[in-house]
Amino acid sequence: LLNLLLSSNPAYRSRVIEEMKSLPDKLKQTIERTEPVIEEIAQECRNHSNFLYMGRGINYPVALEGALKLKEISYIHAEGYSAGEMKHGPIALIEESMPSLFILSGNGVGYSKTLSNLEEIKARKGRVIALTDNGKNLKHILTDKDYIIPTVETIEELSPVINVVPLQLLAYHIAKERGCEIDKPRNLAKSVTVE
């Protein structure tokens, strides 16, 4: 599908190619921007028992990956959900002792709908961690108990490449804070073909 879109729109194709070329620099910037706040979050959240990760559209799989990494190396129960499904179960779990991590990229409809989900969590006294390239709309919503992990802007189609890295770093730093064996997580096989 992407190939079809790229072949039918030369200007868009050029933009995607330029964004792909800039990914190494953008990933470096993302790590530099996010690591200090991620280390702070890791210290604050190392003793939490549960985490909720929410993404919408193309960033829903990123939420799943973030939750999986946290489970695998820090042994904290974490679930990834589509932000559009928040009212169908996850919202019942919201409390101050369970951080909710939202992935908000861009400024389109998906961003505004996910922002609305975040506001619902805040209305229920939930703690929020917002991974975003557009944090200006969050300042009036979040409290000093919440965090913004600032990423860099890219086109929506490439945002998962940028967004997954801070989530992997978060899992790493929380595991490190908990004293977990990061390089040899317990009960994990290197291959999914083990029967």
Image (cartoon, rainbow, N blue to C red):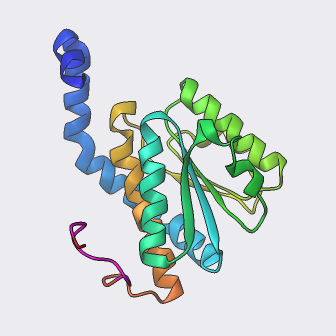
The residue under the point 21% across, 20% down is 13
Residue 1 in picture, x, y percent from top left: 24, 22
The residue under the point 61% across, 64% down is 51
Of the pair 139 and 42, the residue shown nearer to us: 42
- Stretch in magenta: 185-193
Residue at the extreme top: 8
Residue 87 in picture, x, y percent from top left: 71, 40
Q: Quadrant of residue 190?
A: bottom left
The residue under the point 83% across, 46% down is 123
The residue under the point 25% across, 73% down is 195
Side (left or right) of 155 relative to 75? left
Specify whether residue 111 is in view. yes
Q: Quadrant of residue 30?
A: bottom left
Q: Is residue 177 above or below residue 133?
A: below
Residue 152 in picture, x, y percent from top left: 42, 44
Side (left or right) of 124 relative to 106? right
Specify whether residue 141 is in view. no
Side (left or right) of 156 relative to 126? left
Q: Is residue 166 above or below residue 108?
A: below
Of the pair 109 and 143, the residue shown nearer to us: 109
Q: Main secondary structure of the magenta part?
A: loop
Residue 188 in magenta? yes
Residue 155 in magenta? no
